Image (cartoon, helix red, strand yellow):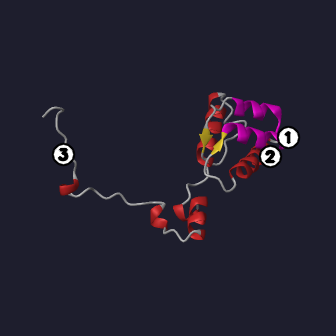
Amino acid sequence: MADQVVLDELQQALDEAFQGRDRVAMREVYARVSAHLRIPADMLAHLNEVPEGRYTREEMAEAINGVIRRRGEQDSLGLLGIPRQRPVEETPAAERAIEDDTPLEYLNPTATPPDDDQTPRFREPGA
C-alpha cells in the first residue's frame, strides 16, 4: 500500500477519534485507528511509541510525527498534516455555549489586572 494512502487513512481515523472532542486518550485513538483495516500493523507500532495521556488533535499529530522522525522515516513515509489551531468560535465548547446562550467571552476571557486596593497584603506569620 502506498505510504500516502496509509497516512491519509491514519488522518481519517484521527479525525474520527477527535470528532466533537477537544482531547482524547491515547488508548481511544489506538482503538479507533486499529479499527481501520487498511492501516498496517507497522503503522500501529508507531502509535505504541506515543506516551499514554490525553491529547488534542494537534498534539497527537505532532507526537506521531515525532515517532516518524525518531525512526528516520520522514522521507520514505512522510509526515501527518498538522491541523491549524481553530479559533474558539469553532470549538465544541463554543457550540455548547451557543446552545446554552453563554457569551463566547467566557470561553476565552481577557485577563484583567487586579485593582491596587484589591491586591492582597501579605505579612509574615506572627507579625
Horizontal relation, residue 62 to residue 37: left or right: left
Q: Are marks 1 and 2 in contact (CB under 8 Å)?
A: yes
Q: Is residue 25 magenta?
A: no
Query: Distance of mark 1 from mark 2, alpha carbons?
Result: 7 Å
Numbered badge on residue 121: 3
Q: CA distance from mark 3 to mark 2?
A: 62 Å
Residue at point 41% right, 60% down?
Answer: 109
Q: Secondary structure at mark 3?
A: loop
Q: Percent x, y for residue 59?
A: 59, 43
Name the quadrant of the N terminus.
Answer: top right
Query: What range of the chain is rendered magenta?
Result: 26-48
Q: Quadrant of residue 25?
A: top right
Residue 70, above or below 64? above
Farthest bottom residue in view: 101
Q: Nearer the viewer, mark 3 or mark 2?
A: 3
Q: Which residue is mark 1?
A: 1
Identify the residue at horizontal 35%, vertical 57% (top origin): 111
In the picture, the quarter occupied by the C terminus is: top left
**57 relative to 90, above or below:** above
C-alpha gap between disc 1 and disc 3: 67 Å
Amino acid found under the numbered disc labelled 1 = Met
Kindly indicate whether the residue at mark 2 contacts the one at mark 3 (C-beta within 8 angstroms). Answer: no
Q: Residue 112: x and y, percent? A: 31, 59
On the image, the x and y values in percent for residue 24 come to: 65, 45
Image coords of residue 10 (percent x, y): 75, 44
Q: Badge 3 local density, few (<14 within 10 Å), some, or many (20+)?
A: few
Q: Please give the residue where the numbered disc 2 appears in the rendered image.
A: 5
Residue 121 placement, left or right of 29: left
Residue 117 horizontal side relative to residue 57, left or right: left
- Residue 28 belongs to the span the image colors magenta: yes
Disc marking residue 122: none
